[in-house]
Image (tube, grey):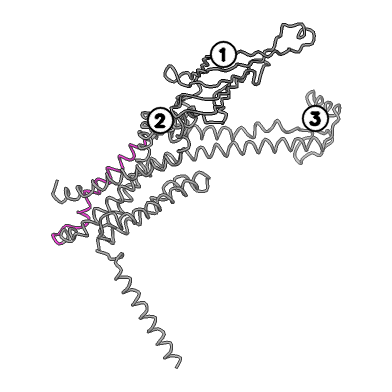
Amino acid sequence: MKRIDKLILTSFWGPFVLTLCVVIFIFLTRLLMFYIDDFVSKDITLATFGRLLFFFSLLTIPTALPLATLLSSLMTYGNLGEFFELTAMKSAGISLTRAMRPLLIVAVLISFFSFWFNNYVSPWANLKGYSLLYDIRTAKATLNLKEGIFYNDLPGYSIKVDKKAKDGVSLKGLVIYKHSTSGMETGNREVILADSGKMYTAQDNSYLVFELYHGNDYQEYADGRSPAYINTGTKPTQFIRNGFNHYKLIIGLESFGLKRTDEQQFEYHEFMKNLGELTHTTDSLKKDLKSTSLSVSTTSKQYYNYQFKPNSAVMPGKEPLKGGKWVDSLLAKNRAVPFDLAQAALNQAQSVLSYASSNITYLTEKQKAVYKYELESHHKFTQALSCFVLFLIGAPLGAIIKKGGFGLPVLVSIVFFVLLYVLTINGDKLAKDGVVWVPIGAWLPNALLLPVGLYFMRQARHDSRIFDKDVYIIAWDRFRKRVTEWRMRRKTQMA
C-alpha cells in the first residue's frame, strides 16, 4: 500500500466510524421516544432492555451506512482540499481519480457488506427485535398502588389504599374487593376491610402477599341446598362476617411480567426474510393470485340461472332446441315453480355484485402483498448500491467545496440523505400501490442520484468552481451588463 493510499484511508475511517455511531444513536433515540409509553412502568430487566437496543442497533446499520459513507468521504476530500493536499497531489502528477481510487474500492466493499447484512443479519435482527418489542408492549405494567384510587389491573381484585408509606410496604386503610366469576355467582361477593397491612412479593415475584391486620371479611353466600331454592329455584343469600387480627391474602402474578411469544408468528413479514425466502414467497403468492383469478369465472356460474323456452327465437344457422328427457324435465320444473322474475333477477344481480366486490378486494390485497415482497427483494440491492452512489456524490463534492470538519459537509450530507430518503419513500409508495412497476419504484432514488454523482465527478476532475461565490457574482455582473447593452441598443433603434 502506498503512502498516499494510507493517508486517504486513515482520514476516512475516523469520520466514518464516528458518523456511523452518531446515526445509530439518533435512530435509537427516535425509537425510544416513539415507544416510551410502552416502556414506562414495565418490569423490564436491564438485560432485556439491552438486548432490545442491540437488535435495533443492528437494524439501523443499513440505513446509517449510506449517510456515513457520504459524510466521511466528503469530509476526507474536503480536508485534503482545505489544506491544499489535493493541490500538491495534482502538482505531483496524481490525478483526482487516482486519489479517489482507495476509497472507491472501500465504497464497493461497503456496498457488498451492506448487501450481505441486509440479506442475512437484518432479517434475523428484525425477527428478534420486533418479537421482543411486541412482548414488551403487551406486558402489563408493574403493580403500582396509588393512595385513594382503586387499582383494577389484578385479575379478580379491586384494591384501594388510603395511605401508603414511603417504603412501599406498609399500608393504611385497605379495601379489597374480590370479584367472583364462577358459575352464576358473578360480581363483588367478598369485601375485605383492614386498618393496616403490608404488601410484598414472594418466590421471585411470582406471588403478591397482603398481610392484613385488624379487619373484617364480608362474604355473600348463596345456598343452593335450602328448601327455598328447591321450591322456587332462587338461591337465598346469606351474609357472613369474619373478624380477624391477622389475615394473609396471596395473589398470583401470572398475568404480570414479560412473556415470550413464539417467534414463528412473525416470520410471515417481508422484513423477516432473506432474498431466497422472499423469492419463494413471491412465486407462491403469484401462483395463488393467478389460480384465484382463473377460478372467479368458474365459481361465479352458481349465481346464474338459465331459462329455456321452447318457442324462443333461434339464432341463424342454429338448429332449434329439441325435446328430450333432460330438457323436458327442466322446462316442466320452470313451469311448475312460479316466482317473481324481476325480484329473482334483482337478488341474483346483488349476489353477483357482492361476490365480485369481495373477489376484487381479495385480489387487490393479494396483489399488494406481491408488490411488498418484490419491493423488499429489490431493496436488498438498492440499499447496498446507495452506499456507492452517495460516495460518488460525497467524494467529488469534498474536492470541490474544499471544506472539512462538521460544518458545511454535514449540511450538504443531510440535504442529499434527506433527498434519498424522500425519493425512497415516494418510490415505495408508488410501487406498493401499483402505480409504477416495482423495479422502477425501487431503483428510482439511485437512478436519479447516480447522474448527479457522475456530474460532480466530472466537475471535480476539471477543477470546477460551482460552489465559489465569486463565480456567481461574476456571472450575475455579466448578465446585468448584457441586459444594459441590450436596452441601450433598443433605445438607439427606437430613436
Q: Is residue 326 magenta?
A: no
Residue 251 lies, in percent from the top left, at: 52, 18
**Residue 20 location (% of width, % of height):** 31, 44
Q: Which residue is mark 2?
A: 128
- Whether residue 231 can be seen here: yes
Q: Amino acid at mark 1?
A: Phe
Q: Quadrant of residue 361?
A: top right
Horizontal placement of 238 versus 213: left or right? right
Q: Cα distance, mark 3 to mark 2?
A: 71 Å
Amino acid carrying label 2: it is Lys
Q: Helix, strand or loop at disc 1?
A: strand
Among numbered discs 3 and 2, the one appearing first in the sequence: 2
Residue position marked by numbered label 1 in the rendering = 244
How crowded pointer 2 is (Cα within 10 Å; few <14, some 14-19, many 20+) is rated as some
In the rendered structure, which amino acid carries the disc numbered 3?
Lys
Which quadrant would residue 343 be assigned to in this image?
top right
Res 322 label: 3
The furthest residue to the bottom: 495
